[in-house]
DNA sequence: TAAGCTTTTGTGGATTTCCACAAAAGCTAC
DNA sequence: GTAGCTTTTGTGGAAATCCACAAAAGCTTA
């Protein structure tokens, strides 16, 4: 007879019942390792469980360990109980886990601390029955969440498109939707290789809900793009934190789910909620520039780091109107064309590398004297003084702009 | 009895009559040394006169010599005949000159080659009578010119404000107004210290009409500004020619007429007549930037030479909208404020001087090691890598933009 | 006033840059 | 193919830069 066949008023009651039957501490999580319920019988509890209960979610380092050990992949691929060995670095004692399924989707997990006893086949069977019973309880949670989600999505798009005009008005909305928020914040945009389908969406959700590097009160998906509102933890290191999250998100998507994220970028970090739109636009600019200037933008993730490329859009627009003709560049290009030389490219690399002779020669695989000769040629042909920053800068920008314009 | 009391059909006839009476070659010029008429009796003629007749105006080097020798100042200040000695460098033989007056204004000059004879008092008297007689003949020319001038002015303003849309249409208008023109051209703008009054206007006209460095088919005056349409002689050196003219105009206004021209600038050199407006706008931008960035713009006259300052207007506009916040600059400025240091200024000079340590130290009157220390401080405080051109450039531009914005 | 900090100046040596000169290699056009 | 050009690579020495270390000077604060 199924000991979980009765009706339960709450998930807490259910957790206690399972604990009672299996004689061990029980923790129930949703698919994103958020704590849903836990048993309260006084048993031994390991540090991992304590931390989970206090934070109402599983600590990220524990999740990372479970991925590394292959526990979670196993749970995501079958509905059988999985034995987990001690992982002492993260304070995790021996336990048995099982995933809760609905159709082909995992709704959550039940974790049972193993204590000092041997699990019999009967125990495993009971756990499987518990998982089945938990399904219906979890489904009810899901439905309530989905309704709210729709309203939240709409709200986020309004923020991104600048629908609201006052900081306090936005604050009020966050409050009404029970979304905890504070500043400073920024918008992160990821561009995926392919349109984001619902399975990938679930995986994204998983990573976003489990990460504890930064707080993500809102996110939405738009074709190949994933847009997040992110709140870094510290004030000082905010930019680094976001950068770090961005990179770990991309590598986790790749490693855990084999999903290719082409790139990501984030806009300015602001305090005023009306600046969400701006940060969003800036994040998109970062992506655009990274796409155009591949190589040299490799390490750039933020709008701040874009440097002069911040205003390339603006300049390009003017350039299209025929502004900013650069005689020097025209002459150099003509010369290159005619004599099959590489003056422009040489100059570009030289300027890229902060006018460092040695590095440039190395980068171009030429003798330093060859570089010197070419640069002398550049001054002559282009009638330019490379010691004059103004001329130099203008030329540099025009070279870059030229590439940008021709893409 | 006055031998010039009769009516003359043309100025040529008049010139011949004067030549006959005084027994020497006669040349009549307007106030700007344009040839109006000359006698044709076969007499000896010096190279200066020959060149004047062939070009229909006095060669510029001859005019310059006459200024240097004090001849022209004398002619402009009295209606007495002036004896001019040989100036062999410019092929000018001995002659006697007199200015033609109407009220307090000089309308032109009569030049008489002295030949190998001695001038008597009677001869001088005759020359004075000739000058008086020439007055009425010249006035008729003036009136015809003034009417045309009004139409020309209107046309020029239409060009400057972009009233015409087609190159050929403009060409046609030039043709109808009998204004010889060809490309490439550019617009030059001078800014005077004070509003330009009619006496200064006449002096300006004098210099513009006598210069042969570049061709000036149109010019107009607008409060403190003088706007020219200029056509350089050569294709290759066009920019240098305009630059040279610009500087000599300013120094001539100063030396000859004691009129202060604050500054001048010229726009791009273009081929298409519809680009007159653009060149004009660019010339104004040059003046604006020279005003704002005084020192470092000293040698800059053209839009080309403006370099990165070409798009400062554009950037400033964005900056006013709250774009381009530069964390580094903010931090540096805060640090300077708090510790009474000069990190920003030091950095600015360093970047101005193309990151040259020695020159910067010299310019700031500090020890090179002090500079090194300050730069190290800049990297630390501003969290910036001065070897990264992108960061460096952005910071440089933001520093300059900051100054520009605060003026 | 002394202690603790930042800033300036000094010294010396390793490294890099700059420059002039020259030989070698590669292209182009007759 | 060879003469005349441009381009590349090499050598060596003067000048400039970079860097570590340290002393001195200047400010701030208890």
Image (cartoon, coloured by chain):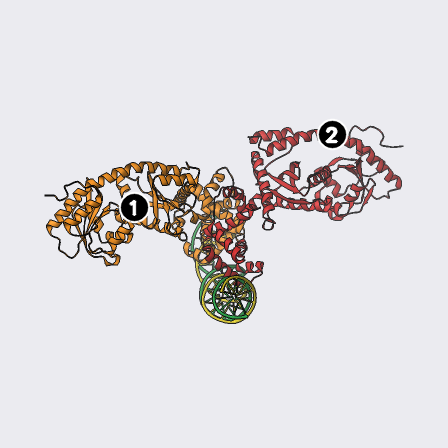
Chain colours: A red, B orange, C yellow, D green
At x 77%, y 32%, the residue is A138
Structural distance between the alpha carbons of marks 1 and 2: 88 Å
Q: Is residue A339 left or right of residue A74?
A: left
In terms of secondary structure, where does tag 1 sit? Answer: helix
Whole-percent x, y for residue A397 in the image? 51, 49
- The residue carrying mark 2 is A143
At x 68%, y 39%, the residue is A195
Check the picture and name the quadrant holding the C terminus of chain B. Answer: top left
Q: Is residue A392 left or right of residue B3?
A: right
- Contact (Cβ within 8 Å) of mark 1 with mark 2: no
Whole-percent x, y for residue B182 in the image? 39, 46
The label on residue B59 is: none
- Total residue callouts: 2
Q: Which chain does tag 1 point to?
A: B
In terms of secondary structure, where does tag 2 sit? Answer: helix
Crowd rating for badge 2 (residues with CA inside 10 Å; few <14, some 14–19, many 20+): few
Q: Tell me if I can see residue A249 in this picture.
A: yes
Whole-percent x, y for residue A19 in the image? 82, 36
Q: Nearer the viewer, residue D18 or B225?
A: B225
- The residue carrying mark 1 is B209
Which mark is in front, 1 or 2? Answer: 1
Q: Is residue C17 left or right of residue A16?
A: left
Check the picture and name the quadrant holding the N terminus of chain B. Answer: top left
Q: Nearer the viewer, residue B334 or B389?
A: B389
At x 62%, y 33%, the residue is A157
Q: In the picture, residue B225 is in which quadrant?
A: top left
Whole-percent x, y for residue B140 in the image? 23, 38
Q: Nearer the viewer, residue B90 or B400?
A: B90
């Amino acid at each position: 007879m199924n000991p979980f066949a009765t009706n339960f008023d709450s998930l807490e009651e259910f957790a206690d019942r399972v604990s009672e039957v299996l004689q061990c501490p029980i923790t129930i999580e949703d698919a994103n390792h958020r704590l849903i319920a836990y048993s309260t019988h006084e048993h031994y509890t390991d540090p991992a469980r304590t931390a989970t209960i206090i934070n109402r979610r599983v600590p990220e380092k524990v999740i990372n360990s479970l991925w590394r050990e292959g526990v979670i992949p196993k749970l995501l691929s079958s509905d059988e109980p999985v034995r987990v060995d001690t992982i002492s670095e993260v304070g995790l004692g021996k336990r048995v886990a099982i995933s809760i399924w609905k159709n082909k989707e995992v709704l959550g997990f039940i974790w049972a601390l193993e204590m000092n006893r041997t699990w019999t086949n009967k125990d495993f069977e009971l756990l499987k029955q518990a998982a089945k019973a938990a399904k219906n309880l979890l489904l009810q949670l899901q439905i309530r969440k989905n309704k709210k989600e729709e309203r939240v999505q709409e709200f986020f798009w309004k923020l991104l498109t600048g629908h609201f005009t006052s900081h306090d008005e936005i604050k009020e909305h966050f409050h009404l939707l029970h979304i905890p928020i504070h500043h400073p914040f920024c918008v992160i945009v990821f561009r995926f290789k392919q349109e984001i389908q619902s399975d990938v969406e679930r995986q994204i959700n998983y990573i976003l809900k489990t990460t504890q590097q930064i707080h993500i009160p809102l996110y939405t998906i738009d074709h190949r793009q994933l847009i997040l509102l992110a709140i870094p933890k510290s004030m000082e290191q905010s930019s680094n934190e976001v950068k770090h999250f961005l990179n770990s998100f991309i590598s986790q998507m790749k490693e855990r789910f084999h999903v290719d994220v082409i790139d990501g970028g984030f806009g300015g970090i602001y305090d005023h909620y009306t600046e969400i739109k701006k940060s969003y636009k800036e994040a998109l600019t970062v992506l655009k520039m990274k796409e155009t200037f591949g190589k040299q933008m490799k390490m750039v993730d933020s709008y701040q780091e874009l440097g002069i490329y911040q205003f390339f859009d603006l300049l390009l627009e003017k350039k299209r109107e025929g502004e900013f003709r650069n005689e020097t560049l025209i002459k150099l290009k003509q010369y290159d064309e005619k004599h099959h030389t590489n003056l422009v490219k040489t100059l570009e690399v030289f300027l890229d590398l902060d006018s460092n002779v040695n590095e440039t020669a190395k980068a171009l695989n030429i003798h330093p004297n060859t570089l010197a000769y070419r640069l002398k040629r550049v001054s002559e042909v282009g009638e330019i003084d490379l010691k004059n920053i103004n001329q130099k800068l203008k030329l540099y920008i025009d070279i870059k702009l030229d590439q940008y314009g021709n893409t």
